[in-house]
Amino acid sequence: MKMANTLLYKVHVENKGWGAWVQEGRLAGTVGQGLRIEAIRIQGVKCYRVHVENIGWMDWVKEDEIAGTVGLGLRIEAIEIECENLNYQVHVQNVGWLDFARNGEMAGTTGGGLRIEAIRLLKSDEPISVDDHRSTFVIAPAPVPVPDPTPMASVQGKKSGKIYLAVGHGVSSDGSWDSGCVDGQYTEADLMLGIGKVAAARLRDIGFTVLTDADTDNDKNIAVCVNEANSWGADIYVSLHCDYNQAPSGTLPIVYPGSGDGIRIANCLIASAQVRLGLGTRGVIQRDDWEVADTGMAACIFETGGVRQDIGLLTNASAFGEVVAQGIYDWF
């Protein structure tokens, strides 16, 4: 699977094998299970190399090539990635999350025999530091049961509040276009932009104040969106995405582990999609992805469906935009 101009990565984990591709800002690997990362593949970067148990620094590899080993049971201990404006952070055995490295710096440790267990990558114009809130990264609890939706009437009455609605992918920090998931003529960035425009307009009609990059044709990456939402003091942050072309049908919201408000947002969006479109759900994921970990308000990454399996619904921006607006309305 190759997505043009999109930052994607996947890791090979002890006892698990290769995980799925994950997108910018999301966690690859495991936390709290004591499992080593043994190999990694990255798309959307220049090159990268890893420091491996009993081997040391291995040769540089180009994007989408395997760095590390498979089948030898050897841990990756450190990684360097060459890519402009790229921040990358690793979770290390006995240490936890280290601060972000950037543009070829080393992330991890050498000489201590410590395994890397998880990694996340994020592009931004400025360096990112998390020294003041490393303790916010927690192990995800068990999946949240999703209640059966209660049929609800369409919007009745005005409400108010400050909503930040982020559109997935679009313009990257280096000015290039990040399409996100691609399937034939359809791209995640374009699909979510259409849905976002409809949702923002509907929410404003209801009485909400909405700040969104849908107004400017998806011209902000997630680091900018998160910073804007925090500076503005939004009441809620919702980021619109869809899953890759091999994903099954259904919504898949992602919320910060243990966030009651996040879980309630997720369930409101799930119920809205089920009742209004007949679209099922794959559940609610609790995970400390960047957009839900670093936002200072209730937050949810809303995976609206699979770009192939649910394309008939995702191309109906009017109907899906109403789903998003109604779900957010129901949360307030």
Image (cartoon, rainbow, N blue to C red):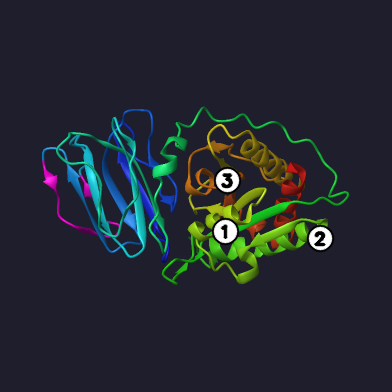
Residue 228 is marked as 1
Quadrant in which residue 45 is drawn? bottom left
Quadrant in which residue 322 is drawn? bottom right
Spatial CA distance of label 2 from label 1 is 22 Å
- Label total for image: 3
Q: Is residue 240 visible?
A: no
Q: Which residue is mark 2?
A: 205
Quadrant assignment for the N terminus: bottom left
Spatial CA distance of label 1 from label 3 is 11 Å
Point out the stretch of residues depicted in magenta. Answer: 55-68
First along the sequence among labels 2 and 1: 2
Q: Residues within 10 Å of mark 3 (few under 14, many from 20)?
A: some
First along the sequence among labels 1 and 3: 1
Q: Position of residue 23 (x, y in %)?
A: 44, 52
Q: Residues within 10 Å of mark 1 (few under 14, many from 20)?
A: some
Q: Which residue is mark 3?
A: 296
Q: Mark 2 and mark 1 in contact? Answer it, CB < 8 Å.
A: no
Q: Secondary structure at mark 1?
A: helix
Three-letter amino acid code at disc 2?
A: Asp
